[in-house]
Amino acid sequence: MHQPGCRRHRLGGGRLVGCVISRKELSFVFRIALITGAFVLGDEGAARAEPAAESAPPVKPPEVIEENRPPYPSEALIDRPSGDVAVTATVGPAGDVNGVELTHGIVPALDRAALNAATRWRFRPAERDGVPVASRVQLLFHFEPPPTIAAQPSAGTPSTPAVPSAPRQIAPVEPSASQPAEPSAIDVTVRGRREAASHGASDFEITVGHLAVIANQKPSDILQLAPGIFIANEGGAGHADQVFLRGFDAEQGQAIEFTVNGVPINEVDNTDGHGYADTHFIIPEVVKNLRVIEGPFSPHQGDFAEAGSADYQLGVVDRRLEISASYGSFKTRRTLALWAPENEREGTFAAAQLFQSDGFGTNRASTNASAMAEYEGEIGTHGLWRILGTAYGTHFQTAGVVRADDVASGRVSFYGSEDPNQGGDAQRYTLSLDLQNPSDMGVLAQQVFLTWRTLRIDEDFTGFLLDNQTFGQTYHPQRGDMIEQDYTAFTAGGRGSDKLVGRLLGRPQSIEVGYYARYDHTTPEIQRLRYGTQIPYAIDENLTTDIVNLALYAEVDLRPTRWLTLRGGVRQEYFDYNVLNQCATAGEFVQNAPLNQTCAPFDNSGPRLPTQRSTATALATEPKITALAQLSQPLTLTASYGIGVQSLDAIYITQNERAPFATITAAEAGMIFHEAYIPVDLSARAVGFYTHVDRDLIFNPLLGRLTQSTGTTRDGALISVRATGQWFDELASATYAHATYDQDGTLVPYVPSVIARSDSTVFGPLGRWRLRGHRFTGTAGFAVNFVGPRALPFSQTAASTLDLDASVSIRWSFLRIGLLAQNLTNARYPLSEFFYASNFNSRSEPTLAPTEHFTAAPPFSLLATVSILLDAESQR
């Protein structure tokens, strides 16, 4: 039946039907030319060419397995042409595109982008009598200049991706007998999520793609694909990772705003650090993209975005059922079950993983379980909604730090532990619901989320250094300096925005207004434990907090000329603190009592209660602006300036405090290069940056947590390059950062001066070999991670480190076998280094002289994985 608004097309022997959306409706949203075929946008957004039931074709036409959508070429932004580019692709018997030719072009820039994208499509080949044969497929790519709403986000460019049609005409290379039968008429529904606008050269959107072969073991592996990021961990497999980002020691994420599909991960007032962000609950196989903004340059960024922000964007491109089992060194075992239904959108999936390992060395065993499920559905004419649920639990042991001189003397092994009682456990549960509803006026977005979290960590940084000394006197036998950190939190919140679009001066302009609201109820507590017994003997901290964070923002996207874009706005942040200190007198000196007496019931002035309440509010204004200048065809110059704020730990809140913030002022200038050299897509960035923080947080080993310090300044530069082709993917970056204290110009400790990384993968069919009609395909990856010298306290320096990893996988039909090797050279090197005083009873007379401490990096390890995959390729 012919539908209103639909047009019939007759190409060769086939009749094809597609619904055409009016230009008015698509003026500032997205316009997708989707004529027919198998490009999957969703259940109703799939356009499939199916033969009529009454006329079975002698040849089975090819089917799309993997498609590629080119971004709008930067070189075309000056004249901003739009329209359809038609490309004829020759599909070989193996399903690869062996050749492309231009059928209908617009301008050279768009033509080149379409031809390059077509070379990276993959198909289930056409068949005659069950035998694969070559065929020709016509693809149609529609280009519309930004801003727009894209069906899926682009991979790391500020431009809007063109959306291709599925095959429009299928013709085997052999003559007439192989023409497919006439397909039935279908309707096409256009739906998509808003593409995030770029905020300069330090705004990276990284598509994982084939790099997953080397970066799919942990979420932190994916995070390290972003330039300037180095990951360490001194707390064990269930402890949040220590993150370094271009001059910042973000510790357990305290200086980086972490989100997953926009849901906040950072935890307020966590005892291990305000802003603690544990990403271990994320299953790597369901991460599609990673967006990292290095610096506080977007009005969407909020609390904790001191060094920047990182958003894990979920989705499964290859629709499949996967069951994987891994086994490797140190009795490491991992089981994964992933279900991504074929006829659903990329945002619909369910996954669960179980992990267990004895760990390398002493006291490093861990177990964890994680589950993530998401459903993405349709709302209205063009809108989408999705609901996400996650559950996670872990129990882990921790080796902790060891003294370098104890290792040198043989008292403790390199992979040993000074205190084998360290460890912890954690749980996390999250539920979120969000929607995006585009219209001819713009985009309306809304999200709500709930999280419940509990955490316990036992750590010992100083041994017996502190407990037995009180004003030069000893009141008791040594009990030990292990601290137990307990934390429980409930988080509820939401965010929403409305983006309005229109035309002014003959060019598209937009304005977006939005809000963010978050409420946290937390109960952080820190106790001192008797050595070897886990019995608490003193309370260092015991709080109950209620914190509200509200924010309003406005962002404009102005295009005063064809070559200049101004993007920025202002964010207004409000905090309300209500802190009940349930042990306010703990630690006060009471005559004839030890220093750490728990919640002393009296002092020299008489009886008193141990509780004390403090309330405070704070308001901050954060302007941000980015300019992007398209001065030449493949080159964009950018400059950004922004002010951000970071809330402080509730332990530092005093009554009626007006501004409990650290203020961040940042600026950068850089360039973005992007060009499609058929068949290679090349992008590169270079950035120089400056950041100033008026009061920073620095790790204090005597307390086992971050404490306030004076202001700091960071400056440096980075370069990043990514090149992708039909059979390879290369991502490389190098960052230099110089971080100093404002007070005396000394180097900020623990911060690497240079971080460089390269991730390389090659992939494709392994010759023409076939077994039982199925070909073999392979993927190999190699990663190099270099970390330069790191400043330590007392003018000490940590040495540079180099780590090499490699991975390979081979697939046949439904079976895939992979092998991952880490630390190929089996180098012994510290992952984290510290310099302070401790006493682990390793000498007859304890000393207060600072010395080197470290946590060991993992030695050489192997992990083998066997996977069963039921997808389109397994049926080829």
Image (cartoon, rainbow, N blue to C red):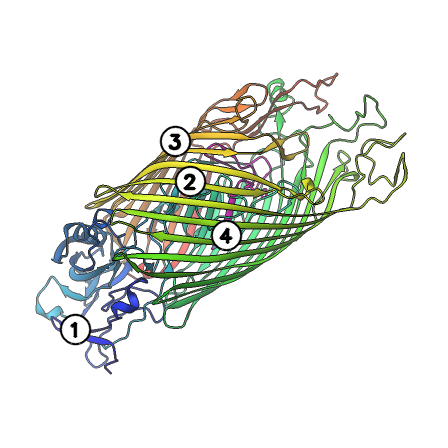
Q: Mark 4 points at which residue?
A: 335
CB atoms of marks 3 and 2 within 8 Å: no
Q: Which mark is residue 9?
A: 1
Q: Horizontal and vertical percent for residue 797? A: 52, 21
Question: Quick check: 128 above or below 157?
Answer: below
Amino acid on which disc 3 is placed: Ala
Q: Name the residue under label 2.
A: 641
Q: How far apart are marks 4 and 1 (CA)?
A: 49 Å
Q: Which of marks 3 and 2 is in front?
A: 2
Q: How crowded is mark 3: few (under 14 residues within 10 Å), some or many (20 or more)?
A: many
CB atoms of marks 4 and 1 within 8 Å: no
Q: Horizontal and vertical percent for residue 214? A: 40, 42
Q: How crowded is mark 4: few (under 14 residues within 10 Å), some or many (20 or more)?
A: some
Q: Nearer the viewer, mark 1 or mark 3?
A: 3
Comes first in the chain, label 4 or label 3: 4
Depth check, front residue: 167 or 422: 167
Q: Which of marks 4 and 1 is in front?
A: 1
Q: Horizontal and vertical percent for residue 739? A: 49, 28
Q: Distance between the residues labelled 2 and 1?
A: 51 Å
Residue drawn at x 70%, y 42% is 654
Comes first in the chain, label 3 or label 2: 2
Range of magenta residues = 233-261
Amino acid on which disc 1 is placed: His
Q: How far apart are marks 2 and 4 (CA)?
A: 45 Å
Amino acid on which disc 2 is placed: Tyr
Q: Which mark is residue 717?
A: 3
> Can you name the residue that lies furthest to the left here?
175
Residue drawn at x 22%, y 68% is 35
